Image (spheres, rainbow, N blue to C red):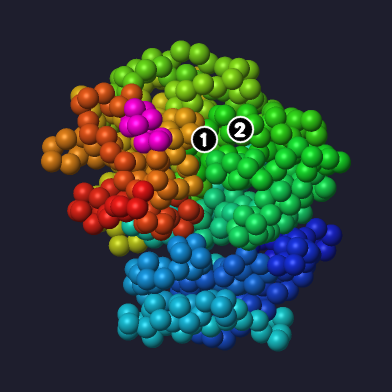
Amino acid sequence: MIGWLDDPSERRGVRFRQDDGTWQRLTYRELAAQTLRAGAALADEGVRPGDVVPLVLPAGPDFVSQFFGLLAIGATPSVLPLPQALRAGEGYQNQLRAIAARIRPKLAVADPRYQDVVRESVAELGTATRVVAPVHADREDAAPRANGELAVLQFTSGSRGAPRGLRISVANMAANLRMIQSWMGLESHGAVTWLPLYHDMGLVGGLLGGLTVQVEHALMRPEQFIRDSTGWLAEYGRHPYTSMCMPNFGFERVLARTRPEHLDGLDFAGLRAVVSGAERIDPAVLARFVALLQPHGFDIHALMPAYGLAEGTLAVTGVGRQQVPRLVRASGLERRLGEKLDVGSVVELGAEPVSEPWLWQVSCGRPMDGVRVDILDEEGAPQPEGVLGEIYVEGPSVAEGYVDATPEDRAKLGDGKLHTGDAGFLLDGELYVVGRLGDSVKINGQTVFVEDIELELVASGAISRNHATVVAGITAGTPTVLVVTERPLGERLDEALSVIRSFTGDAASARVMYVKRGAIPLTSSRKPRRRALWLSYAAGELKERKDS
């Protein structure tokens, strides 16, 4: 991971987007010098090998120098969300307190803008944590180098429950980076990444995958991407960056903001690896993205949908280079764990228009080199291809385990083995991800996934993905599917209820709740915390607005 510090390139470098829209470029030699000075300064502040140091820093040169400076002296960085990622306020402070209580750090490094809120969050823990701005020594003779055991203490996004601290070893990280670099074919140019660096997709896939092999790379902050999604895309048309990586909502954002005339004079022929992952992949969105870029040289073979999660360090499976992603139409609602799905059409993306998008599953490709993926039934027995079950992963990049792990945690994750809690199936050796078991509900023995319902509601126009989400569970012994929306549905209400009942029939309760803005809890990666939302509803704590 830190080998680049020993022989940093003077020819290649990293560009950092500035607030005024310009770019600052630093060569790897310049970044290495800053990093060694940061390591020396951190050691002067009392950081020792094995210490865990939280970082509350935006994407930029300081992030790179502090992150790798810690690794260079044998310490472990833990990248925490920024206040705006969780709408700041009390919720953010509570999350910081919960994380700090697990780490109990002696020192935290925070951007000056965030130091006060970080200090307030940890003050009552009695840890005497010192919060400092990014540090750099005046000298370049860094503190003695040391090899740490952990590459990062990575906190999960919270979409599966409360954020959990994951022990990602240096060996885990090195294995996953090798997989990613081999799979994507990184050579001279990497990506223009905007993903949050406190999330595994942003840190591992967005930053470390390119930086550790010293490709020409570029970093934006998430809010810069949100403000100027078209400008982000244009960087690929003006420069020979070869890869991009983002969740489905990132592609939606680009499509919502970019018109064909914005791309006049741009060339996207150099894009060879476009990765979609981290959430349910909508084939219609990918098809629209291809249609937008194809007149400007983009090749559909560059699309590489993938599956990964923090517990796997990041990447688990991915569609190979120069393969058009396949779609499988899993017909009907008969979805029982441990039973074969009714698989109908198998087509290449773009071969035909996609109707009823929830029926179509996008291939997430084959396992990465050295990774084994099985599908298990409810008793934990491996299943043949085409059978729906829990996705199980083994490999060298599976995280060591959780901080403060319980026996249940260790049964789920340990010794290179991971029960993901996600449901899917294999077909011709490729993985298709259906949804999360914890976000599903059983109705008459069938498993109904809220992702399916949500995808169909969005496709129908009944709800907006940015202002509504779907949760499900059991209330008073009755299966219940609930749409929580921050915008009143008005005349679309009956349509939304009809869509729900098309999945559940009369065997479940269907309901829509209109709530105040901000009532839907989000993870640090802006995904809905479905479990927390359902528990709030079940406890009677979710309040409905009456002004619709």
Look at the image and tell me whether residue 528 can be seen: no
Magenta highlight range: 491-500
Circle count: 2
Relative vertical location of residue 276 with respect to residue 294 in this rendering, above or below: below
| Residue holding disc 2 | 286
Query: Magenta includes 493?
Result: yes
| Residue type for callout 1 | Ile
Whole-Å distance between the Cαs marked 2 and 1?
8 Å
- Tell me: 199 left or right of 233: left
Where is residue 501, by image quadrant? top left
Mark sitting earlier along the chain (2/1)? 1
Query: Magenta includes 233?
Result: no
The residue positioned 49% from the left and 68% from the top of the image is 83
The kind of secondary structure element at disc 2 is: helix
| Residue holding disc 1 | 281
Q: Which residue is at the front of the view, 462 or 38? A: 462
Whole-percent x and y of residue 119? Answer: 44, 82
Magenta-colored segment: predominant secondary structure: helix
Relative vertical location of residue 498 with respect to residue 170 in this rendering, above or below: above
| Residue type for callout 2 | Leu
The kind of secondary structure element at disc 1 is: loop
Whole-percent x and y of residue 353? Answer: 59, 20
- Do tag 2 and tag 1 residues touch (Cβ < 8 Å)? yes
Dot 1, crowdedness within 10 Å: few (<14), some or many (≥20)? many
Looking at the rendered image, the quarter that the N terminus falls into is bottom right
Whole-percent x and y of residue 66? Answer: 60, 72
What residue occupies the far top of the structure in this picture? 344
